[in-house]
Every structure is written in structure tokens, then in C-alpha cells.
Amino acid sequence: MKNSGSDKVDILGCEVSRVDLAMAAARVEGLLRGGKHQVAVVPVSSVMTARRDAAFRLILNQATVVLPDGMPLVWASRLLGRPIPGRVAGADFLLKFSKLAAAKGYSFFFMGGQPGVPEELARELRRLNPKLKIVGTCSPPFGRDFPPEVNQDIVRRINLSRPDVLWVGLGASKQEKWIHDNLGRLEVKVAVGVGAAFDLCSGRVQRAPAWMCRSGLEWLHRFRLEPRRLFRRYFIEGLPFAPLVLWQAIMGRGRCGKAEH
């Protein structure tokens, strides 16, 4: 098993932060004190993609914080002997950090989603947190990559707003690659890729009941809403996750088990 440091656990080559929701909010707030940081929200599907995509895996492993979005990652970490305290879904983290930001005066910029979604998200978060500072929104054109002139304009708009936190909702792995490629030019302290959180927190997409989230069944709720889009992700690409983690635990136990206990 790869030694990924005391604050992370290596799950199939992807180094995931050992945090729960409260710890994640505190850690990301600490990043606002200096430097530029990428924060990734990683579900099982991203871990499986990272196994096939070395460039994506490197980006995730270079991110300052990698949040565990899914109970299967929590269960995997326990099996691997380096337990994650709790699940940190992108939508939950956005809501949690919005409340914190409203109290502390941190500013947000939302980039991503279909036309109108970032604005709906801003309105909903302001309704929940009237003091929240949202300094800009942007819904870029759909596509695998942005033309250079479009990308330059997006970066310019963000930099003019100078937010403390940039939230990017382009979907994995596009959002992580975009943040990685542009962070050096962005006048932000923290950039977070949150995937479907824009749709969930704005109310465009219904979230699963709390009991499904706690039980690791949120994927089933999402599959019911979007079966065509998510069938491959859950039933083809994600199916090997459990046996691969079991194999990692078996192979790593002899090398790192004594050091961990």
C-alpha cells in the first residue's frame, strides 16, 4: 500500500483526505490564509476514472484536499486500516461552507452549470445565508474544452471579481483538469470542483432522502432520476470497486499493517 501521509488514505491509487464534514470545512477555511489551493470532491466514479487516467490521478493526488464523496469510500478506508471519519458530499460541503462564509465574510464565485443554474444557486444560498457574499457567476458554453478566447474571458471575469473561493461545477473530471490548468492564472485562494452540487443545492435536482445518504444508497436515487446517463458509471465502471479495494487490503496488509497499528 502506498504511504499517502497521516491525513490521507490511498484508495486504489487515489489519495483521499481523512476528514468528515466539519473537519473539511475547517481545513478548507485554513487554506484561505495563504497560497492557492485546489480542493477536489471525489466519488467512487472519480476514483475508478483515476485508475485509467494517469493525468487525472496525478491532478487529484496533487490537490491540497480531496473530499470523500460517498459511503463506499468511507467503508473502503476502514478496510484499508486508515478510516475516514465520515462522508463529505459536494452538496453538503457547499451548504456547510456557505454558512461559514456568511459568518466570516468570505466571498464566492460560481462557475459552471447550465445557463441560469449559477444564478439560481446564488439566490438559494443567499436565501439560506443572507450575509453571504457572492461576487460573480458564469455559465460557460458546453463542450469538452473551451476555446482559448472563451477560457481567457472566463479567467478574466473571475479575476475581476477576486473571490476568496471559486466553486466549479463542470462535472468530473473536466472540472478538476480545468482548475489544475488555470489555477496559476486565477486570482483566488481556493478552487473547489463540486460536480452536481450546483443542481442539487439550487433545487433543480431533488436530493436523496437523508437515510439513503447515510446508508450509502444515494447512488440508487440518482440512478432512478437519470438511468441512461448513470447506468455505465454505476453498473459497469463502478462494479469492480469493491473487489479491487479488497485486493488492495489483502496485498497491503503484510507491508503496512504493523506500522498502522
Image (cartoon, rainbow, N blue to C red):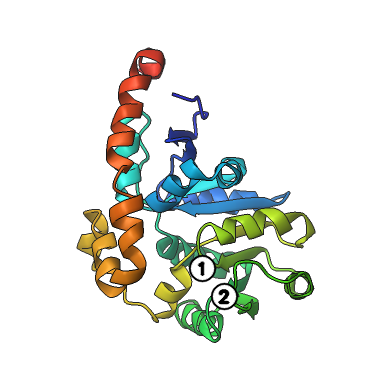
Can you tell which mark lies on residue 98?
1
Image quarter for residue 159?
Answer: bottom right
- Asked whether the beta carbons under mark 1 and mark 2 sit within 8 Å of each other, the answer is yes
Q: CA distance from mark 1 to mark 2?
A: 7 Å
Residue 24: tell me if it is visible: yes
- Residues packed near mark 2 inside 10 Å, few (<14), some (14 to 19) or many (20 plus): many
Q: In terms of image quadrants, where is residue 260?
A: top left
From the viewer's side, name the closer residue of 12 and 165: 12
- The image shows residue 189 at horizontal and vertical percentages of 69, 57
Report whether 157 appears left or right of 134: right
Residue 78 at least partly seen: no
Residue at 60%, 67% (x, y): give it: 144
Q: Is residue 199 left or right of residue 246?
A: right
- Say which quadrant the N terminus sits in: top left
Query: What is the quadrant of the C terminus in the image?
Result: top left
Q: Secondary structure at mark 1?
A: helix
Residue placed under numbered mark 2 in the picture = 132
Residue at screen point 43% across, 44% down: 19
Q: Secondary structure at mark 2?
A: loop
On the image, the x and y values in percent for residue 16 come to 47, 41
Q: Position of residue 54 (x, y in %)?
A: 57, 41
Indicate the amino acid at tag 2. Answer: Leu
Find residue 7 and name its label.
none
Q: Say above or below: 72 vs 185.
A: above
The disc labelled 1 sits on which kind of residue?
Ser
* Residue at the spot 55% in from the left edge and 79% down from the top edge: 118
Question: Would you place residue 141 above or below residue 230 in this image?
Answer: below
Q: Residue at x 58, y 54 (%)?
A: 29
Q: Is residue 221 toward the left or the right of residue 100 in the image?
A: left
Q: Position of residue 133 (x, y in %)?
A: 62, 75
